[in-house]
Image (tube, rainbow, N blue to C red):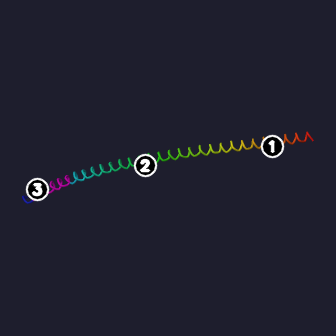
Amino acid sequence: MNAKLIAIAAASVLALAACENTADGARQDAAAAADAAERAAAEAAAETERAAAELEAAAEEAAAEADAAMDQAAAEAEQAADQAADATREAAADAAGAVKDAAAEAEEAARD
């Protein structure tokens, strides 16, 4: 019976030691998991900041491109207006010349 009690006591001591080792391992695992979660959160925050910066840069670039396109469209519209004004002046001058020529011909015909 003493042998059984000694065996039970030895098994109990070994079980308690195993539990303590398991608890230490669990604490270490929990600490490692907490560290990993902290690193993942920091990486996610950094990635979010990078994405926000890229988005801001893209928005600024798009705004600059839109600005340049509007400036170019305005310049082209101004050039077209200038060309239309020149064409109108030329047409008016041609019409005035034709009227003057017609008047001169009519005057000459009246003299004959």
Q: Amino acid at mark 2?
A: Glu
Chain part drawn in magenta: 4-24
Q: Amino acid at mark 1?
A: Ala
Binning the other alpha carbons within 10 Å of mark 3 as few (below 14), some (14 to 19) or many (20 upward) gives few
* Residue situated furthest right in the rendering: 112
Residue plotted at (53% across, 46% down) = 68
Residue plotted at (8% across, 60% down) = 3
Magenta stretch contains residue 13: yes
Query: Residue 71 appears at what percent x and percent y?
Result: 56, 44
How far is mark 3 from mark 1, CA to CA?
130 Å
Tell which of 76 and 93 is nearer to you: 93
How far is mark 1 from mark 2, CA to CA?
65 Å
As drawn, is 6 to the left or to the right of 87?
A: left
Query: Residue 6 appears at what percent x and percent y?
Result: 8, 58
Tell which of 66 and 41 is nearer to you: 66
Name the image quarter holding residue 95. Answer: top right
Q: Amino acid at mark 3?
A: Ala
Quarter containing the N terminus: bottom left
Residue plotted at (32% across, 48% down) = 42
Where is 6 relative to 60, above or below?
Answer: below
Residue receiving disc 3: 9
Binning the other alpha carbons within 10 Å of mark 1 as few (below 14), some (14 to 19) or many (20 upward) gives few
As drawn, is 10 to the left or to the right of 99?
A: left
Decide which of tag 3 and tag 1 comes sooner along the chain.
Answer: 3
Residue receiving disc 1: 98
Pair 3/1: label in front: 1
Residue receiving disc 2: 54
